[in-house]
Image (cartoon, rainbow, N blue to C red):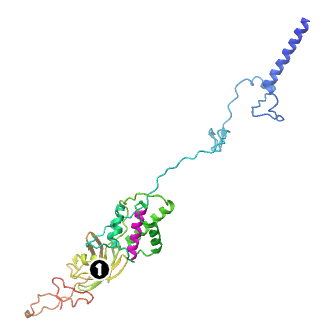
Amino acid sequence: MAVSLGVRISGLLVVGAVAVAVAAFGGDGSDTPDGGGGGSTVVTVGPSDEAQAHTAPASPTPHQSPAGEASATVPQDTPTHTHRSTQAPSATPTNKPLLTPSWLPPGPVSPNSDPTPDPSSVYDQLRDPGQCRAALSSIPPTSADPEWRLLRALASACLAVQGQGGSWDTATKEYAALTGKADTCKGRAAYAVLGGLLDFHRQHPSATVRLKASSGGAPACSYRVAGVAPADAEPGDVVDVDLRGTYFDPAELLRFGSVLIGGRQVPVPPVLKSAAGDELVLSVVVPPLDDYTKKADVVVRYGAAEARLPDVLTVGSPAVLPSPDASSGTPEGMFSLGPLPAHLPGAQPAAGLRVP
């Protein structure tokens, strides 16, 4: 009985050992091609590899790049793990400040020699966004002039965007009605800024911002002499000076401005021949010069505003009349320019000129 019991125990031990070996090397069959198991790794060991089955596996051979260099990096599209969250990514709050609309560029500032407001000087006042209400009060409320209407709409939008009153409806209607009617450099700049304010209001209907005066940057106007005609003249002749980019009241230029040809001021005040927006044509009388051997510069000044076109006008030397007899009292070498043009009212000859 004792022997039989010992044999049975030994048999059980042998069977158990075999079962342990099978479990260690073959698993439970659930990961075999026919099994329906999960994801545990299947290790297959051949009869001659029994000694290697209990050692650490060798490092895998690096993947060779087309150039033959080993690549140890993971491709960018290779996932680093297989876990995927089922939760939606949390939205990051974006509290970005609103961009303040651009404001008026420099004019430059008009000399404005008289106290009467004009569109150019009111533009200069509006360059300070804190003066929009004061500027609005100086604009004629019923004027149909496009420049005044545009500045009135801009001042109103300036107040509205800063939450200080104004009227978006007025600004919108005037902007649409004045399309293509801004014909001065300051007027075109004002129209562009008004359009920017309206775009801002459409994107942020309930927002208000504090406008800031622009510093530096390109000016709205480029004041210059565009040409002189004709290109050849003599003292006493009338030439036309074409001005562009004027940023002041033309009437002030005629009263307070000056024109120089070859460094000499013209003998009579200039006369406005034509005006279209910021383009003016002045008619001026050519003065006698000190030097007729070189072409003359033409300069138009008004306050700090100066436009110059160098070497543009050839002024011929006047003919010298025969010396008169002593009874005439005329200095030798004096010449006559003839009557000044009739369209120059109140013309007075320059010193040294004799007008019959």
- The answer to which quarter of the image holds residue 193 is bottom left
Q: Residues within 10 Å of mark 1 (few under 14, many from 20)?
A: many
Label count reads: 1
- Residue 25's place in the image compared with 131, above or below, is above
Residue 270: percent from left, percent from top: 26, 81
Query: Can residue 314 be seen in the rendering of this structure?
Result: yes
Residue 43: percent from left, percent from top: 77, 30
158 within the magenta span: yes
Q: Residue at x 91, y 8 (%)?
A: 4
Location of mark 1 (residue):
313
**Range drawn in magenta:** 145-160
Quarter of the image with the N terminus in it: top right
- The answer to which quarter of the image holds residue 197 is bottom left
Majority secondary structure of magenta residues: helix
Give whichever of 290, 40 is nearer the camera.
40
Quarter of the image with the C terminus in it: bottom left
| Dot 1 amino acid type | Leu
Q: Looking at the image, which residue sits at the far left?
A: 327
Give whichever of 185, 129 is nearer the camera.
129
156 within the magenta span: yes
Whether residue 272 sits left or right of residue 170 in the image: it is left
